[in-house]
């Protein structure tokens, strides 16, 4: 093993040696000498940064000095780097983008195009397709990250339990006509029977009375219960519409939802086995469907902390009335929230969605948790190559509310215009971010106070001040040094004007920060010597041509050293690059 600075090279016979993570590779040229080059990976090839011949096992100070400027150790993803080079600091997009991966975008080529187009997180919805299929997608994305320098995080979305129509294959949809009589049953049968709908859950009709309303998919069609026959319901169609496979069933009485999900577990047996799969594949996020209370979230978090060697973040999906009733406790318990407007629209009247969305987004900012706004953002693009004006207005509103992330569902999973939809999200968010920054700031930003008790009040204050200083002084960027991402997220919470570069030596932290508004995470080795870390990272960024003399950055650090000899290093400083 040869050691140079904080890089190490393995020396294996006459084979070329590679350490792609560090961007280093070398060829042994004799039994005690190795020639090596080091650099950043691009398009699967190492772009050489440093070339040298060195003695194996001997520390070479000259090379160490060269390697101080070595560009390969700066873990900045290619997409942010290109964006930065092209548009400068203020041009970096703040709002993060999540894409649901499905049959329309699962080839290596399609995934690469989505990554290039700005996908920050890939979502795999375990409601659909086989585990092998999902595994294949995960492997491809990890491969793209390793070989081509992307940094796309992975999210598994659980199926969850829900009362719905069984997907019996064909036909794909049936029309219910006004006044027609239908039987909703739990009887199991293959194929389809006329005027009969199979429900997936035995107890679906418990507590339901004659006269109650049965609503399909939040309003696609409506029935009135006219007769109860054992567990089955005979219903008359009062508002005609389509019955799709897996359509959701909800019951209403006197204009209010009849709670049906009490008996259903938040995590089913299938969900638990999908969670094992998520752990073994080392994904970054698990989005938990139909969360009812904080206990379910805490339980999963505890489970993951004992079972998973890497940190996996738990996102709670808010998609039921019950979750809305316990919003604060759920937000506080989770690592982030998804506003799952699809199912939420089944449980609350549609006209309440906009205000509920804004309220949840505000609660997330208060508790400092990232929030994703999901479902139907560009729904018409599942079929058409352009969005409706109303859809663009919806996306803009989500950005104006300072959501951390926006999500595509069917638009990318099954639609033929997935990349285009992603670019619509990118352009629309860029435009609204600029407008908010320049024209609308004061009206939307609200007071800084955190709702939750942050264990470290000093960190919170430092971050609030840092964001204010960076804005007031008109600085170019904020550099924050963070092991677990806490400081980066506390700065992001203030939604400052300049971009936040979060330097971390923890790859899980890097991947988790991909969901955080305005944060560009960078993987880098961090030593206990904070001054050295700061100088080294500024040099690295400068060597790459991403920062120039005269640029001013705000540097924030709060790294607790690993050795006990040093004290906690907390500081804010303004550095002008020279
Ligand atoms: N992995 C997948 N395999 C096949 N189809 C998928 C997959 N993921 C999503 N889809 C399709 O994309 C649509 C939209 O995705 P999503 O919103 O995540 O699911 P759902 O409609 O079940 O809530 C789904 O209805 C399904 O038709
Ligand atoms: C995102 C959602 O969940 P899923 O697609 O899993 O139903 C939703 O209901 O909006
Ligand atoms: K799901
Ligand atoms: Mg849902």
Image (cartoon, helix red, strand yellow):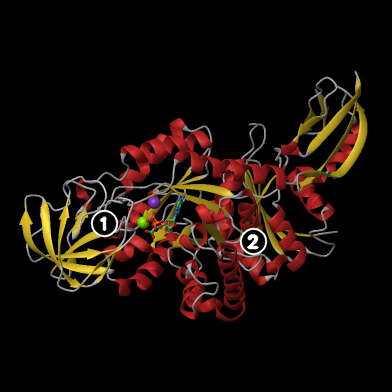
Residue 550 visible within the image: yes
Q: Do residues under tags 2 and 1 come within 8 Å of each other at their CB atoms?
A: no
Report how far apart the C-alphas of labels 2 and 1 lie in the structure: 37 Å
Rendered view: 106 above or below 419: above
Residue picked out by circle 2: 117
Image position, residue 534 (x, y; %): 74, 49
Residue 445 visible within the image: no
Image position, residue 11 (x, y; %): 82, 23
Q: Nearer the viewer, mark 2 or mark 1?
A: 2
Q: Is residue 291 left or right of residue 239?
A: right
Rendered view: 386 above or below 259: below
Q: In terms of depth relative to the viewer, which is nearer, 49 or 496?
A: 49
Crowding near the residue tagged with mark 2, few <14, some 14–19, many ≥20 C-alpha atoms within 10 Å: some
Residue picked out by circle 1: 322
Q: Residue at x 83, y 58 (%)?
A: 545
Q: Residue at x 78, y 34 (%)?
A: 6
Crowding near the residue tagged with mark 1, few <14, some 14–19, many ≥20 C-alpha atoms within 10 Å: some
Q: Is mark 2 within 8 Å of ligand 1?
A: no
Earlier-in-chain disc, 2 versus 1: 2
Quarter of the image with the N terminus in it? top right
Which label number is shown at residue 559? none
Q: In terms of depth relative to the viewer, which is nearer, 300 or 393?
A: 393
Rendered view: 511 above or below 341: above
Image position, residue 29 (x, y; %): 92, 25
Image position, residue 10 (x, y; %): 79, 25
Q: Is mark 1 within 8 Å of ligand 4?
A: no
Label total for image:
2
Quarter for ligand 1?
bottom left
Quarter of the image with the C terminus in it? bottom right
Q: Is residue 199 left or right of residue 298?
A: left
Secondary structure, mark 2, is helix
Q: In terms of depth relative to the viewer, which is nearer, 217 or 55?
A: 217
């Amino acid at each position: 093993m040869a050691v140079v600075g904080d890089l190490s090279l393995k020396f294996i016979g006459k084979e070329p040696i590679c350490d792609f993570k560090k961007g280093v590779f070398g060829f042994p040229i004799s039994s005690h000498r190795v020639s090596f080059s080091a650099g950043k990976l691009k398009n699967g090839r190492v772009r050489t940064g440093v070339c040298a011949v060195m003695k194996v096992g001997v520390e070479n100070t000259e090379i160490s000095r060269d390697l101080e400027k070595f560009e390969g150790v700066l873990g900045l993803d290619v997409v942010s780097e290109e964006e930065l080079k092209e548009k400068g600091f203020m041009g970096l997009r703040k709002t993060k983008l999540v894409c649901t991966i499905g049959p329309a975008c699962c080839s290596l080529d399609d995934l690469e195009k989505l990554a290039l187009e700005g996908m920050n997180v890939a979502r795999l919805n375990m409601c659909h397709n086989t585990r092998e299929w999902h595994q294949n997608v995960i492997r491809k994305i990890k491969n793209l990250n390793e070989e081509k320098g992307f940094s796309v995080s992975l999210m598994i979305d659980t199926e969850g339990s829900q009362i719905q129509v069984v997907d019996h294959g064909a036909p794909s949809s049936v029309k219910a006509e006004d006044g027609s009589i239908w039987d909703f049953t739990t009887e199991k049968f293959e194929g389809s029977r006329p005027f009969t709908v199979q429900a997936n859950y035995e107890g679906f009709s418990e507590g339901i009375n004659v006269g109650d309303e049965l609503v399909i998919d939040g309003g696609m069609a409506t029935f009135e219960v006219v007769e109860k026959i054992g567990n089955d319901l005979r219903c008359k169609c009062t508002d005609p519409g389509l019955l799709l496979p897996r359509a959701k069933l909800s019951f209403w009485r006197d204009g209010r939802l009849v709670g049906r999900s009490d008996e259903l577990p938040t995590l089913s047996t299938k969900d638990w086995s999908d969670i094992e799969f998520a752990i073994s594949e080392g994904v970054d996020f698990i989005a938990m469907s139909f969360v009812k209370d904080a206990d379910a979230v805490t339980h999963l978090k505890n489970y993951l902390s004992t079972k998973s060697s890497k940190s996996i973040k738990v996102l709670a999906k808010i998609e039921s009335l019950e979750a809305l009733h316990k919003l604060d406790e759920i937000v506080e318990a989770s690592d982030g929230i998804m506003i799952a407007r699809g199912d939420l629209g089944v449980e609350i009247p549609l006209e309440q969605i906009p205000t509920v969305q804004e309220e949840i987004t505000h609660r997330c900012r208060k508790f400092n948790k990232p929030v994703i706004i999901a479902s139907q953002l560009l729904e018409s693009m599942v079929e058409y190559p352009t969005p409706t004006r109303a859809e663009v207005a919806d996306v803009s509103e989500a950005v104006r509310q300072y959501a951390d992330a926006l999500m595509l569902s069917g638009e990318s999973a099954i639609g033929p215009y997935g990349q285009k939809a992603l670019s619509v999200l990118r352009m629309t968010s860029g435009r609204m971010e600029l407008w908010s920054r320049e024209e609308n700031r004061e009206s939307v930003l609200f007071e800084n106070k955190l709702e939750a008790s942050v264990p470290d009040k000093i960190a919170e204050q430092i971050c609030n001040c840092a964001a204010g200083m960076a804005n007031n002084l008109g600085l170019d960027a904020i550099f924050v040094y963070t092991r677990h991402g806490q400081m980066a997220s506390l700065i992001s919470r203030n939604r400052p004007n300049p971009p936040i570069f979060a330097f971390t030596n923890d790859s899980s932290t890097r991947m988790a920060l991909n969901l955080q508004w305005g944060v560009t995470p960078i993987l880098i080795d961090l030593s206990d010597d904070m001054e050295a870390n700061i100088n080294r990272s500024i040099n690295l960024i400068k060597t790459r041509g991403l920062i120039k003399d005269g640029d001013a950055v705000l540097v924030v650090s709060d790294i607790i050293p690993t050795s006990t000899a040093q004290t906690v290093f907390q500081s804010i400083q303004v550095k002008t690059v020279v």
